[in-house]
Image (spheres, rainbow, N blue to C red):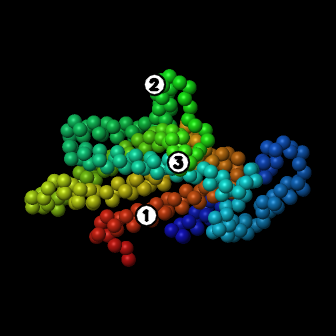
Amino acid sequence: MFPTMFFVSVVVFFLMQMIPGDPVELKMLGDGSGDFSPEQLTLERERYGLNDHPVIQFTNWMFGVVQLDFGVSILTDRRVSEDIAIALPLSFQIAIMSTLLATLLAIPLGTLAALRQDTWVDYLIRIFSIAGIATPGFFLGIMMIIGILVITNSQWAPPFDYKPIWVDPWYNLSMLIWPALATGYRYSAVAMRMTRSTVLEVLREDYIRTARAKGLVEKIIINRHALTNAMLPVITVIGIEFAFLIGGLVVTEQVFNLAGIGNLFVTAVELKDYMVVQALVLIVAFVFVFTNFFIDILYAWLDPRIRYA
């Protein structure tokens, strides 16, 4: 995990250094200071430490990252950690809600489709899952908003200000339930297809036939023997999709007017705010690495044959 995170840090830092354009100059032009002198530009760059050698800049940045200090945003002059602290809880909650919804849909329906292979139940679930894969989350979100407007016959709009669920549960859920449904449906469709395929593969194994020949109850065979082994690839898909949702909901956040990590990512890239981009890439990479690590631990727990030296 640590070599991977260090490699990501090096790559993102020096790639940002190679991007053309000066964020400090862009900021001063945006402030209306079009007649600034080269001395003012040099002083401003000195204030942010941009006149130092790139290696020194990287070393100072890494020392700050270890202390969870990602520096100061060049464009807003706020601590980068403050901006992330506002956006991250929103994206994290959507990712958790979408994951729970996807899991509750994918595993039961995927298992049912495998047990009822080539029946009308199987065909119906497959149509449902393929439709989810084919429908972009942002389009489904737009259809949801239009549907709410038509059904309620009102001027409803997604809430603007984010409030944590422990502060105002009703307001929080009314804001995030719809993007969670839009992303969770597509998310569940991928996991549903994987669940059906892996359960079908496991049900053809010799030990399942042996369990049936011994007279074990079908419910025990499915729950204790088939699903336990079939869940390994499904957990991998669910984990990777969860990590993707942390920073990959840019368009969905735009549709529902949410100030999440994806929205912050796009804004920082457009304005060449190096500090924010570096911090966000590092956080998303950490989520991916930690999620994969957690999945590896689950492998060993679900399958006793797997052991890590």
**Of residues 162 and 102, which is closer to you in this image?**
162
Cβ atoms under marks 2 and 3 closer than 8 Å: no
Residue 104: x, y in percent? 35, 47
Q: Determine the residue positioned at 37% across, 49% down.
A: 103
Q: Is residue 70 left or right of residue 148?
A: right
Label 3 belongs to which residue? 165
Label 1 belongs to which residue? 294
Count every numbered label the image shows and give the total. Answer: 3
Cβ atoms under marks 3 and 1 closer than 8 Å: no
Which residue is most to the bottom?
A: 309
**Of residues 39 and 254, which is closer to you in this image?**
254
Res. 246 visible in picture: no
Crowding at mark 1 (Cα within 10 Å: few <14, some 14-19, many 20+): few
Position of the C terminus, as image quadrant, is: bottom left
Res. 208 visible in picture: yes
Q: Determine the residue positioned at 48% across, 41% down.
A: 177
Q: CA distance from mark 3 to mark 1?
A: 26 Å
Disc 2 marks a residue whose amino acid type is Ile
Label 2 belongs to which residue? 151
Q: Nearer the viewer, mark 2 or mark 3?
A: 3
